[in-house]
Amino acid sequence: MTHPSIKERFREILLQHNFPQHYYLLAISGGVDSMILLNLFRESSAKFQVAHCNFQLRGDDAIRDEEFVRDYCAKHTIPFHSVKFDVEAYQKTGNYSVEMACRNLRYDWFKDVQKVNNLDYLVTAHHLDDNLETFIINLSRGTGLKGLVGMQIDNGKIFRPLLEFTKSQLIAYAQENNLDWKEDYTNETDDYTRNKIRHHISPILKEIHPQFNANFLQTLEFLNDNQQIIAQQIQLVKTSLFKGENPIRINVDELKKLNPLASYLHYLFESYGFLSTKELIKFLDSNTGSEIKSDTYRLIKDRENLLLIIIEKSTENEIQILDDFIEINSLNLKFVKSKNPNEYATEIVDFTTILFPLKLRKVREGDFFYPIGMNGKKKLVNKFMKDLKLSKLEKENVWLLCDQNDQIIWIVNHRLDERFKTTQTSKNFLNITLC
Amino acid sequence: MTHPSIKERFREILLQHNFPQHYYLLAISGGVDSMILLNLFRESSAKFQVAHCNFQLRGDDAIRDEEFVRDYCAKHTIPFHSVKFDVEAYQKTGNYSVEMACRNLRYDWFKDVQKVNNLDYLVTAHHLDDNLETFIINLSRGTGLKGLVGMQIDNGKIFRPLLEFTKSQLIAYAQENNLDWKEDYTNETDDYTRNKIRHHISPILKEIHPQFNANFLQTLEFLNDNQQIIAQQIQLVKTSLFKGENPIRINVDELKKLNPLASYLHYLFESYGFLSTKELIKFLDSNTGSEIKSDTYRLIKDRENLLLIIIEKSTENEIQILDDFIEINSLNLKFVKSKNPNEYATEIVDFTTILFPLKLRKVREGDFFYPIGMNGKKKLVNKFMKDLKLSKLEKENVWLLCDQNDQIIWIVNHRLDERFKTTQTSKNFLNITLC
């Protein structure tokens, strides 16, 4: 690729990106890559603003760079945003490396600037050498396809129009067009691994094949296509195996037929937050009632199925009943005090036996009650549920209707307590209806 | 991985390969990798023989190596095969590099030895470093997934039990076990690219990540899994889009809906020998009747479909009719001379008008005939077929029944020639039946 073509190719890329529909925020450090990005945008008719981060890690150089970008924007009347970060203070808020801290600070701030100024795309000056370095780092870490395809030119949020150009093409372009930029000397030292790759591996790869860069770009495209094809296959498998919603039911035997199993499990469950394939494989053969959790989902083994259930953030375990009608998830209960037992009621108890207010709560360890029809014998609620052969999930969904003293009146929808039953002498009734 | 574990791990790998079911041919050069392979096999209870190639390219060293392996096998009573090749002579038979020539000669000979001795698996001493070098070479060439997954431990024909060990693990193992081997000094110089990688890239990769080798092995496994998942998706797509057999019909609009199109076309058509994706994409929009060919298949554009047709190697264009019954592909013709016209015949001609023997042949440019019912007017066969709106494929399947003088008697199954028709004075008939 010759240098003048960078400009032409950049225009094509902008067009492919439907640039008039977007308002961009350019992340500009003042280094050669970002100043080329800024220059190319300035020469286009795209709408954009500029953001510069000062991490205050490089003394006078950091001040110099900020001034440099600010002046450039002022000169060309480009809306400019800048921020100063206290990286060390941020690092103390968690276990962050300098790189990670800068990354978090930078991207969070960009998001804020975008929101306030209504800028829909962030634009960075990443180039092909960045992707090659990432490829090799991920290779050395033992990655899947995802780690090898690297950054995307457009991931829906970030636009990287320089991603197909190499560093040396960019530098040649900058020199040829007399662009001005500020060297960041820490680039040469701040990342041990990337520098090893940049200085010792990349040059040899280019010696091995004169077209290495173009070919590597081609490889990335192929791998990207492969990823899309895999996603389509995974979607087909998901459609055929994942039944229903919350819980999603997945037949274990069907799941086990998938081959290669480990990779299928990885792709099928990663979006639910389950990232350990080994754990998933083991889980397939676990006992009924076994459970593993991600941040967002529970996975329960229930005989021949796996159940995938959303973890509701605000699942209540105890609810005071202050009205005569209460709705909890799919459970609708109506309470009516009456002189007569209502024949349509689900259960009827003796009103005078109850100490109000009522409450509904989940089962706790050690809960007991006196099941009606057992001659006043006491029974553990857990034992009662076990005898009913309720599944783990069904057990969790059991509600107890209790009185003020936490005595169990009714295991909702299952069994009344002997102590609250109506007798021949009852005169006031509480009719409870499950609607 | 510590050294003693090579032996244990090797045993596991043999077991996974169901080794008692196989009879192996070990390719043994005498170098360290192959001598370890030989040693490990000798210490197992696997059945095997040994093959050694002498390419006569390294003077006395080549003789020394052959003797070394021969002696080892004699000492341990292992069936031994060897061969001497004239590489230069072979190179002259085609445009082969030394490497390619050696490769072809070697693998062809191995096949012969396997066949004669009933050895179902070839075993080579390829190791992880070989796969890493291949990975990087293919990366530099711009490859897809196939080029990155490298050699397989078992591809159904070749078994590579050392593929997960690194060169340095193998050398340490050989030293620790006091194995004897012969150094091949050309290894250090004979392959420029592999040596660049071996000496300049691999060491740095190992510096970048201490677990590089294990992680790279992991990556290869992931990529392998990905390839399998892709193959399953391609099979599903093929099942839904490729209709019928020879010709296989493929709806062009359905094909065009596939995304990413280029990669899908690559995977769908590579097994039919169509390797240029660009050509395939262009072909989708070509005119009806357009055609491209691979070594084994023709791909024809026929209105809304593509037709995929096997190229029959022995497709005859002209067939002498020496019997009264002839079968060509799906065409079965029966000829009966009779005093009476047979009412069940497909066509009946006047026997006396024909100069025998008859022949069947395909249409040639410039062929003409006198269609019956056109008052003796002459017509080009091509024009006749065009007026019938025959497709390209149908036209190619048209046979002409001709007499000794190559006069067209019948465009089989379409139209008789005026010159051979029966008249009121006909006394002898040739009844032709399409069965």
Image (cartoon, coloured by chain):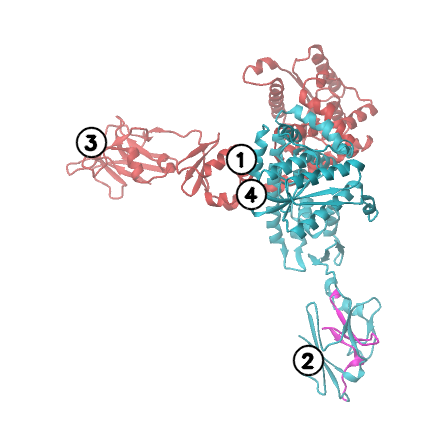
Chain colours: A red, B cyan
Q: Earlier in the sequence, mark 4 or mark 1?
A: 4
Chain of the residue on which disc 1 is drawn: A
Q: Quadrant of residue A131?
A: top right
Viewer-side residue, B311 vs B238 = B311
| CA neighbours of label 2 inside 10 A, class few (<14), some (14 to 19), many (20+) | some
Per the model, the C-alpha gap separating discs 3 and 4 is 58 Å
> Circle 4 sits in a helix, a strand or a loop, which is it?
helix
Can you tell which mark lies on residue A271?
Answer: 1
| CA neighbours of label 4 inside 10 A, class few (<14), some (14 to 19), many (20+) | some
Q: Are marks 4 and 2 on the same chain?
A: no
Q: On screen, B418 above or below A413?
A: below
**Camera-nearest label, 2 or 3:** 2
Q: As shown in the figure, which amino acid type bears the numbered disc 3?
A: Thr
Q: Quadrant of residue B334?
A: bottom right
| CA neighbours of label 1 inside 10 A, class few (<14), some (14 to 19), many (20+) | few
Q: Quick check: is A325 in the magenta stretch?
A: no
Q: As shown in the figure, which amino acid type bears the numbered disc 1?
A: Ser
Tell me the residue that label 3 is attached to: A352
Can you tell which mark lies on residue B345?
Answer: 2
Q: As shown in the figure, which amino acid type bears the numbered disc 2?
A: Ala
State the quadrant of the N terminus of chain A: top right
Per the model, the C-alpha gap separating discs 2 and 1 is 70 Å
Mark 4–mark 1 CB contact (< 8 Å): no
Q: On screen, A330 above or below A141?
A: below
Viewer-side residue, A18 vs A66 = A66
Q: Which residues are magenta?
A: B395-424
Per the model, the C-alpha gap separating discs 4 and 2 is 58 Å
Chain of the residue on which disc 3 is drawn: A
Location of residue B294 in the rendering, given as x and y in whole percent from the top left corner: 74, 53
Can you tell which mark lies on residue A235?
Answer: 4
